[in-house]
Amino acid sequence: MIARLFDKISTNHSLLSFGRGMGVGLLALWGLFTVTSCDDMLATDSDLYVNADGGNLTDPTDTIYSMVGILNKLQPLADRTVLLGEVRADLVDLTSYASTDLQQLATFTVADDNVYNNPRDYYAVINNCNYFLAHADTALKNNRGERIFEKEFAAVKGIRAWTYLQLALVYGRVPFVIEPITSAQIDEADYPMADLAYICRYFIDDLTPYIHTDMPGYGTIGNVDSRFLYFPINILLGELNLWAGNYREAALSYYRYISTRNGVGTSWPLPTFMAYWRSDELSYEGHYVDGWEINCFQTESYTTGGELVTLIPGDSISSSPYYSSLPSLWNTTTGNDGYYSLTPSAAIINLSKAQVYCNRNSAGEVSYAPTNLPDYLTGDLRLRSAWYTSSRGTLEGRPRVQTMYKHSGESPHVHLWRSSMVWLRLAEALNCAGFPQFAYNILATGVNNNTIDSLQNVYKADSVWLEQFNFPNTLHVLRTESLSGYTTIGVHSRGSGFTEWNEHYALPMPEDSTATLAAIVAHQQPIIEDLIMDECALELAFEGHRFYDLMRVALRRGDPAYLASRVSARRGEGVSSSIAVDLTDSQRWYLPLNGGK
């Protein structure tokens, strides 16, 4: 098996190759690199590489070449990460024009030769990372006594951890290799098989020493701010601990990222990007205001209040193997002659319509939007903000014109992580850790130190633990505190209006007014978890997370039917989804590891 996974990984040219036309300008001070290139950054047909036959990587030039080579190896995983996370879940349906490979994903009948089933691509990343980690001279210091390669070392460990996590989520049990392989003559017995639990334990230990290490700063590579090219250590630790069931540790990891993303002593409130009806709207006939789609998906500038966290860069040249296929799979384009393959499912359409949009006018009066608005304007507005369909200009026999703004092709890059994902993961971890009201506040109102003070009165036995969370009131201004000067909102308000005043989105409480805190928490946790999963669907649909969100809850509850029932109902309750296997058998959730022959 290992030989199949690692064949065609050479020991020099393909190991650390990087982008065609990549010109590298290194400034005198380490850490201030500016790398320029064509838009087709990180293509693979380059003559430039770091020769793996040499000794340690001791020069900044060698190191940046190696980093770009690793980033190059991530490119084949970009589209696949999104598609494996969505096509197998409940929020996406296929059109009749979808390829056999996509149909196999959707029906859980993936063959060994399916184009999306190639574990070797993951091991190409891992082997590059293993080589770098084995050969970078981490003892080398500059004239200030600072370790020169520490940031790169942490970044590469993060990339390796993310790649192994993807492998475990896609394949279940995988060969675990942490040394560089430079020969195709490999005895697979030398490498143990690792499952998700082992991978989480290993990489939690591996990454924890780097929680305070910044990512490298190379300026701009191609047309991308290099800060978007890494997987931040604290988010990775949040993900690994969440999967491992270490919920307090997960919550603190996500919090560390939020509280240090803009520097020590700062914060990163959930940006107030919304799709909304104007507060004094009466007829709900005018066009809604959309500040959500453009700021969350069309913006790739790095700002203190920005949304984007991590992307995998793509090629702008359509003939390149690293030109993203997502726009043509989702949109009416000249390239696909109008025959797109993916479309939102009935499940996400129905969930969006089921939300109650709350409005609050300038006089402070609360009302609710009608429940029969056209064109998917009923309920939450984010689906309509992300997706547009029309019969205009459609030829007879052709599908309706469709635009998916999350994957519209405005950028050649594939976005993986953003702010709302981090906050929703924090809410999930807190709910599982026994703080459902804290999690609810993230969904409904946003949080600041006033919120923490009130939570300490609720969870008195854990008040010291809660003191670790610091959301300065001057930076996290809630809408309940200032309608004109607020700086953060609850995630649900991004598409459903003034959730703070929505009586249909109230904190769940048991009917027994004398219930103990333990009873209240036990009552609230499953309800809040369902709210979080619904919010993940409304906010993060089509971005690659959904199947794994369902998987994580199903594993946590010990209930495979949780995942199976939702995936089976992607076309609506009682409508066949053509799934060919029994998804209550969790082994059916994984792809065959012997793919990509």
Image: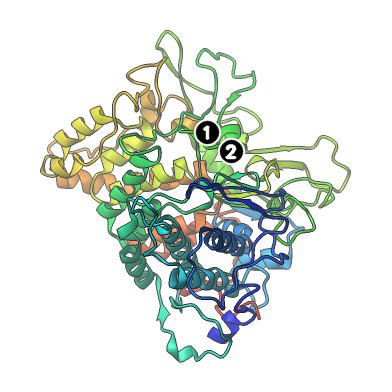
Q: Is residue 230 left or right of residue 349?
A: left
Residue at image location 64% in from the left, 49% down from the top: 413
Color scheme of the displayed model: rainbow
Q: Which residue is mark 2?
A: 383
Direction from residue 180 to residue 521 in the image, left or right:
left
Residue 576 at x, y percent in the picture: 61, 60
Label 1 crowd bin: few (<14), some (14–19), many (20+), radius 10 Å? many
User: Of helix, strand and loop, which one carries label 1?
Assistant: loop
Q: Quadrant of residue 349?
A: top right
Query: Residue at coordinates 62% horizontally, 61% vertically from top-left?
Result: 72
* Residue 258 placement (x, y as % from top left): 36, 41
Report the front residue among 509 and 53.
Answer: 53
Q: Could you classify mark 2 by the number of other residues whose Cα lies within 10 Å: few (under 14), some (14-19), or many (20 or more)? A: many
- On screen, 238 above or below 457? below
Q: Is residue 133 left or right of residue 372?
A: left
Figure quadrant of the N terminus: bottom right
The residue closer to the viewer here, 309 or 549, is 309
User: What is the secondary structure assignment of the residue under circle 2?
Assistant: helix
Q: From this viewpoint, which residue is outermost toward the right?
A: 396
Amino acid type of the residue tagged 2 in the rendering: Leu
Query: Where's residue 427, x and y in %?
Result: 34, 44
Query: Residue 179, percent across and down?
Result: 45, 78
Residue lying farthest front? 143
Query: Residue 380: which disc?
Result: 1
Vertical side of 431 occupied by 82: above or below: below
Q: Are marks 1 and 2 in contact (CB under 8 Å)?
A: yes
Examine the image and state in which quarter residue 120 appears.
Answer: bottom right
Q: Quarter-wise, where is residue 74 in the image?
A: bottom right
